[in-house]
Amino acid sequence: MPSVRFLLVPLALTLGHATSWAQVPVVRTPPPEKRPWDPSAPQPSEQVPAPSRNDAPDAAWTGFPGATSAPTGPDAAPLPRLPEVPPLVPVPDDEEPVSVAPSTPRLPEPPPGPPPVPNRVSLLGARSVGPGGVAVGLSLGFPVVSARAALGVLPRVDVLAGFDTLYGMMNEPRLGLRWTALDGGPRWSLGVVVEGSHAFFLRSASMEDRGARYLSGRRNWNVMPGLVGTFQMRGPRAPRLFADVRYHVALDTEPIQRTPLGGLPPDLVSSGSVPVRLGAEVPLSEKTSYSVSLGGDFRGRSEDATFMPVVSIGIVTGL
């Protein structure tokens, strides 16, 4: 039966291979600790201790497998020569390395310029501006806003002109003279000043109770003689202090009789007060300064306040 023969031959071949595989013994690899010692087998290399800090490195750390020695004699001539490296200096392990701060380059110093020109322009003090000199200033404060100008006509005499306003309720043009009586050089001076003015009021005296006359202390005609002193600290741009003390004579051509059955008031009534101003002119440049003034008016008229504070800040410059 040929068909059965063809089926039995592959089956016999398959069973024969399976039997041969089953007869091969299986060899297990023992663990490392139970393996027999074989002197011919490669053994692990010995551990090389690491060098301490800053010690010369050991040859076991610098060498590598397969290293060859450098050629010597005529064969070493064509090889490039490396720069010589200085030997390492060992440092004890217990010492800390000293840190060196990087040096910053020093820039060359600029050449010294000319010294600053001293500021001698004074409008509120006692020093004259000199022949042909002009000084102007503007100040804003309470109770008035002021504009001033000084024109030098003689070495120690100035003509003064100004304008004061109580924010429109009172307007007063002024005219006067300033004479530097004592000149102590650039540090101090003492002068005599006198000013006269005529004030124009927005409202008449009969319609006013605590208005422009009460706040400003001015009347229709005003004369203010007094003394002015100046002291400047050391330095070309040092502050210049001043003190201004005057006696204010007010002439009222519109007096009001406030006492019942007092009769008609006279045509002219005079009163006196003492204005005191303390301040400083602080130079900003050769001819320009800003000014600060504090003080008050000590008044003797019963219709006015006994004391009226005054404060202002402004700027002064020379032309």
Image: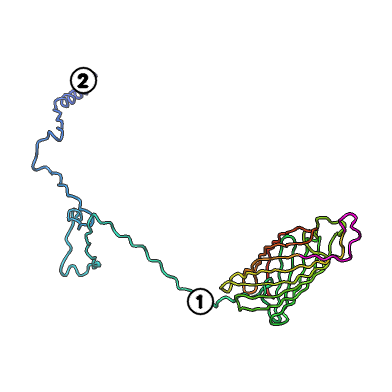
The amino acid at mark 2 is: Leu
Q: Residues within 10 Å of mark 1 (few under 14, many from 20)?
A: few
Q: Secondary structure at mark 1?
A: loop
Q: Is residue 263 above or below residue 7?
A: below
Q: Residue at x 18, y 57 (%)?
A: 67
Q: Secondary structure at mark 2?
A: helix
Q: Residue at x 78, y 64 (%)?
A: 165
Report x, y in % for residue 274.
73, 65
Question: Who comes first in sequence, dot 1 or dot 2?
Answer: 2
Tell me the magenta residue range.
Answer: 257-272
Mark 1 sits on what residue? 112
Residue 271 lies in the magenta-colored region = yes
Nearest to viewer (mark 1 / mark 2): 1
Q: Is residue 48 above or below residue 79?
A: above
Q: Is residue 235 above or below residue 54?
A: below
Q: Examine the residues drawn in magenta and state their main secondary structure.
A: loop
Q: Residues within 10 Å of mark 2 (few under 14, many from 20)?
A: few
Left or right of residue 206: residue 166: left
Q: Which mark is residue 8?
A: 2
Cα separation between marks 1 and 2: 121 Å
**Which corner quadrant of the image does residue 199 belong to?**
bottom right
Report x, y in % for residue 198.
82, 68
Q: Nearer the viewer, residue 231 or 101?
A: 231
Q: Nearer the viewer, residue 2 or 293?
A: 293
**Which corner quadrant of the image does residue 11 belong to?**
top left
> From the image, which quarter does the N terminus lie in?
top left
Q: Which mark is residue 312?
A: none
Q: Nearer the viewer, residue 159 or 44?
A: 159
Q: Residue at x 49, y 76 (%)?
A: 111
The amino acid at mark 1 is: Pro
Left or right of residue 135: residue 3: left
Report x, y in % for residue 89.
22, 62
